[in-house]
C-alpha cells in the first residue's frame, strides 16, 4: 500500500514541478525571450523535464525517510538579457513558478473544502487532491525562500538598488552552502507556513 501511495505522490510531484518550470518558460516567452521554446521545453511532457536526482532519487529519500515528498525538475533555460526589462523581467519569470504552484494548490484545495462540505466528490479523489495541495504548497513556499538559486532570490535581487548588485555575485558564490544550511537546519520554518496555508485553503488540518 505504501508503494502505491508513493507512486501517486511521485506522479503528483512530477506534474507539479513540470508545471512550475513550464510557467517560467512561458513567462520568459511573454517577456521577449524564446530560449525555452527553442529548447523544446514549453511542453508538459514530463520526459523533457525530469531530473533523475531531483525527480526520482530525492523524492524517494524524502518520502521514505522524512515522511514527506520533495523534489525538482530540470530548470527551464532562459536568457535574462532578452527580457523586455532584464531587472523586473527576471523577477516575473522567477515568480511565475511558485505562482503556478499556489494556483494549483488553491484550485484543488477549494475542491477539497467544498467536496468535504457537500460530499459531491469520491474519497479517493479527495485523498489525491489533499496530497496535491500539500506538495504544491511545499514547492511554492520553498522556492520563495530568498536564497540562490531559488526563485525567491531573483525576486529579492530585483529589489536591490544598482549599487548593491555586486553583492548578488558574492551571495551566489555561497548559494549551495546557504541552501544546505537551510535544508538541514531551518527546514522547520517551512512547515508552519505550509500548515497555515493548507488549513486556510482546505479548512482541514495539515497532516
Image (cartoon, helix red, strand yellow):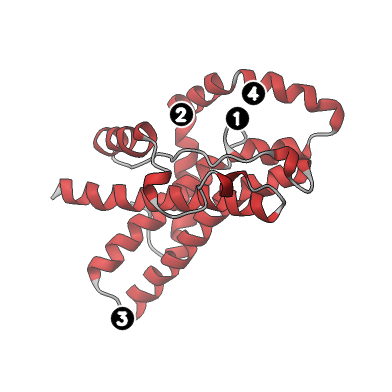
Badge 4 or badge 1: first in the primary sequence: 1
Determine the residue positioned at 44% across, 47% down: 17
Judge by depth and name the residue closer to the eye, 2 or 10.
10
Label 2, residues with CA under 10 Å away: few <14, some 14-19, many ≥20 = few
Does residue 54 appear left or right of residue 42 in this picture?
left
The residue pinned by badge 3 equals: 120
Mark linked to residue 183: 2
- Residue 170: image tag: none
* Relative image position of residue 85 (x, y in whole percent): 79, 46
Calculate the distance from the C-alpha at mark 3 to the C-alpha at mark 1: 43 Å
Do callouts 4 and 1 mark residues in contact (Cβ within 8 Å)? yes
Name the residue located 77 percent from the left edge and 41 percent from the top edge.
86
Query: Of marks 3 and 2, which one's residue comes earlier in the chain?
Result: 3
- Of marks 2 and 4, the one in the foreground: 4
Residue 86 higher or lower than 120, as above or below: above
Residue 177 placement (x, y as % from top left): 53, 19
Q: Residue furthest right?
A: 163
Q: Secondary structure at mark 4?
A: helix
Which residue does the numbered mark 4 point to in the structure image?
A: 172
Amino acid at each position: 500500500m505504501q508503494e502505491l501511495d508513493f507512486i501517486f505522490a511521485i506522479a503528483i510531484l512530477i506534474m507539479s514541478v513540470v508545471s512550475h518550470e513550464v510557467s517560467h518558460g512561458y513567462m520568459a516567452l511573454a517577456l521577449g525571450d524564446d530560449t525555452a521554446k527553442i529548447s523544446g521545453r514549453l511542453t508538459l511532457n514530463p520526459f523533457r523535464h525530469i531530473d533523475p536526482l531531483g525527480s526520482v532519487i530525492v523524492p524517494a529519500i524524502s518520502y521514505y525517510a522524512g515522511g514527506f515528498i520533495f523534489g525538482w525538475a530540470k530548470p527551464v533555460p532562459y536568457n535574462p538579457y532578452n527580457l523586455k526589462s532584464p531587472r523586473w523581467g527576471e523577477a516575473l519569470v522567477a515568480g511565475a513558478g511558485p505562482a503556478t504552484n499556489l494556483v494549483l494548490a488553491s484550485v484543488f484545495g477549494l475542491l477539497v473544502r467544498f467536496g468535504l462540505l457537500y460530499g459531491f466528490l469520491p474519497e479517493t479523489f479527495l485523498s489525491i487532491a489533499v496530497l496535491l495541495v500539500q506538495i504544491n504548497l511545499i514547492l511554492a513556499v520553498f522556492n520563495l525562500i530568498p536564497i540562490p538559486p531559488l526563485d525567491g532570490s531573483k525576486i529579492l535581487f530585483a529589489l536591490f538598488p544598482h549599487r548593491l548588485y555586486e553583492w548578488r555575485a558574492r551571495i551566489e558564490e555561497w548559494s549551495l552552502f546557504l541552501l544546505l544550511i537551510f535544508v538541514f537546519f531551518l527546514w522547520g520554518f517551512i512547515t508552519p507556513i505550509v500548515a497555515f496555508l493548507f488549513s486556510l485553503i482546505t479548512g482541514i488540518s495539515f497532516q
